Image: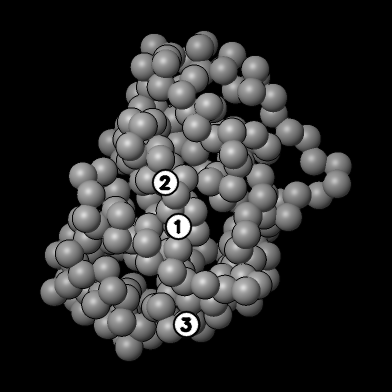
Amino acid sequence: MLILGLQKTTLLDYPGKIASTVFTGGCNFRCPYCHNRDLVMPPSDVQAYSTDEIFEHLKAKSKVLDGVCITGGEPTLHKDLPDFIKQIKDMGLLVKLDTNGTNPDMVNYLINAGLIDYVAMDIKHSKEKYNTIACMKNFDISPIEDTVSLLISGKMDYEFRTTIMRECHDISDMESIGRWLSGAKAYYLQSYRESEQVINPIFSPHSVETLQEFVNILRPYIPNTSIRGVD
């Protein structure tokens, strides 16, 4: 595992839980709005955490923590992810996985092995416009569609979420996404925010009124749709 970050305590990353967040390095997407540039494209002098350091922390905080959120980057790129998670589960902690959905086989394995308790999957855009944000070479949306179907049709606790930008998302996109994710358990629209780590800082947020309009469009398809990241 290439681990490039650790947030020791968070009340936000794992809904309803006290958690630590582990940040893995590397991603197969190059989303220009991503606020984790150094995780997606690690600099040559990056300082990684050892797994021993992570587990020393988790053991020290085991009486306080409910679980661990594993995010990135894209965690499912790491073949040793299941072994890493098993050690966390052996400590009696819950595990939440953040993923872009490009590795449905890994997600399916983790679910069937009982290694994860919650999945948060990023939905970048409507299917037709997906790669305008993902910027992925040889783009094939079918693995992403497979992960969406896996979560909607299964019993795993999950959510979908989309970072919304004024330059990228409009009413017709919300209609398209709503039809695609129809019947989903939960969907969150996350308002874009500036950050020093944004890969390409050319974007801006929609107004709260527009975000609420998007929510109203989506709720007939996904009743549990709401907004995140708005003060």
Quick one: SS at disc 3? Answer: helix
User: What label sits on residue 101 in the rendered view?
Assistant: 1
Mark 3, residue position: 129
The residue that appears at 86% across and 47% down in the rendered structure is 44
User: Mark 3, mark 2: which one is toward the viewer?
Assistant: 2
The residue that appears at 51% across and 83% down in the rendered structure is 167
Contact (Cβ within 8 Å) of mark 1 with mark 2: yes
Quick one: SS at disc 1? Answer: loop
The residue that appears at 55% across and 80% down in the rendered structure is 132
Q: Which of marks 2 and 1 precedes in the sequence?
A: 1
Mark 2, residue position: 107
Contact (Cβ within 8 Å) of mark 3 with mark 2: no
Residue type, label 1: Gly
Residue 52 quadrant: top right
Residue type, label 2: Val
Residue 207 position in % (x across, y down): 38, 77
Residue 209 position in % (x across, y down): 29, 77
